[in-house]
Amino acid sequence: MKIAIIEDEQLHADLLAAYLRTWAEKNGERPDISAFPSAETFLFAWQEEKDFDVLFIDIQMKEMNGMEMAKRIRAEDEETAIVFTTGISDYLEEGYEVDAVHYLLKPISEEKIGMCMDKIKKRRKTENFLLVHHGEEVRKLPIERINYVEARGHGCVLGISGQNGKDKGENGGEFAVTESISELEKALFPYHFVKCHRSYLCRIAGIHHIDKKEIFFDDGSHIPVSRRLYGEINRAFIEYFRKL
């Protein structure tokens, strides 16, 4: 689990890191904990590798405050757990807007950090992620939101289910990665992805219906199905939902 502490007061950052390590020892976790003294320094690191699992963000920081930073993160990443640590409750309503897991008022306690991490760990158990390369970046994508994989050029495009199926990018629409379709087929096989065309994989759980030429997903997106594989895909679709 990769955790970032964004806090401009060194004492609070050190205390939070100590509480997190205590929780990790009790729960058999081996977290990678990094501390950043400002929103700007964290965003610089985040642009390089967007693979953080949990962010502990102090709201009251100089220059860019923590809430503004969190909104920038949420514009591109809906999955990373966000926890606010602050001395005031003025931003509580805005915390809901960015889907914060917790809003902790200082002084923070070891007990509250433990409860917070227990909640995050429980939520993570129900999610599966795929690590992919997007240009020079490494991204973590929730597998349950990938509808299909399309081989395109020297890499692939992933069809991501979002709140708006017309959105383009990691939060919905098409997302380009450098992995080959054979690499992704192997990685996604345990999650009920099957080949439905020579250039496509589809996630059975995301299918809404199938006709002779196309597969339609719950968000309205659709891809072709080959005549040769139609019968096999149709059977897999029916069997999957019968088991549920």
Image (tube, rainbow, N blue to C red):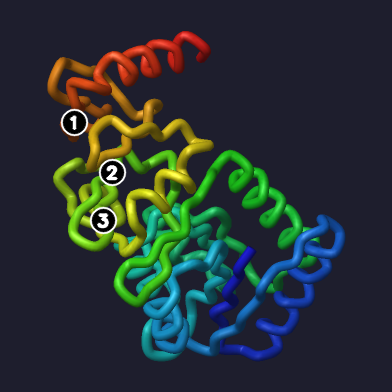
**Element class at badge 3:** strand
**Element class at badge 1:** loop
Q: Percent position (x, y) of residue 109?
A: 76, 67
Q: Percent position (x, y) of residue 116?
A: 67, 55
Q: Quadrant of residue 15?
A: bottom right
Horizontal relation, residue 222 to residue 72: left or right: left
Could you tell which of marks 1 and 3 lies nearer the N-terminus?
3
Q: Mark 2 points at which residue?
A: 162
Q: Distance between the residues labelled 1 and 2?
A: 11 Å
**Element class at badge 2:** loop
Against 23, is 165 above or below? above
Q: Distance between the residues labelled 2 and 3?
A: 12 Å
Q: Name the residue under label 1.
A: 220
Against 116, is 214 above or below? above
The residue positioned 28% from the left and 49% from the top of the image is 158
Amino acid type, callout 2: Gly
Q: Quadrant of residue 155?
A: bottom left
The residue positioned 43% from the left and 14% from the top of the image is 241
Horizontal relation, residue 194 to residue 211: left or right: right
Could you tell which of marks 2 and 3 lies nearer the N-terminus?
2
Q: Label 2: few (<14), some or many (≥20) within 10 Å? A: some
The residue positioned 80% from the left and 62% from the top of the image is 23
Q: Mark 3 points at which residue?
A: 175
The residue positioned 48% from the left and 75% from the top of the image is 59
Amino acid type, callout 3: Phe
Q: Label 3: few (<14), some or many (≥20) within 10 Å? A: some
Horizontal relation, residue 158 to residue 25: left or right: left
Q: Does the rendering let one see residue 176?
A: yes
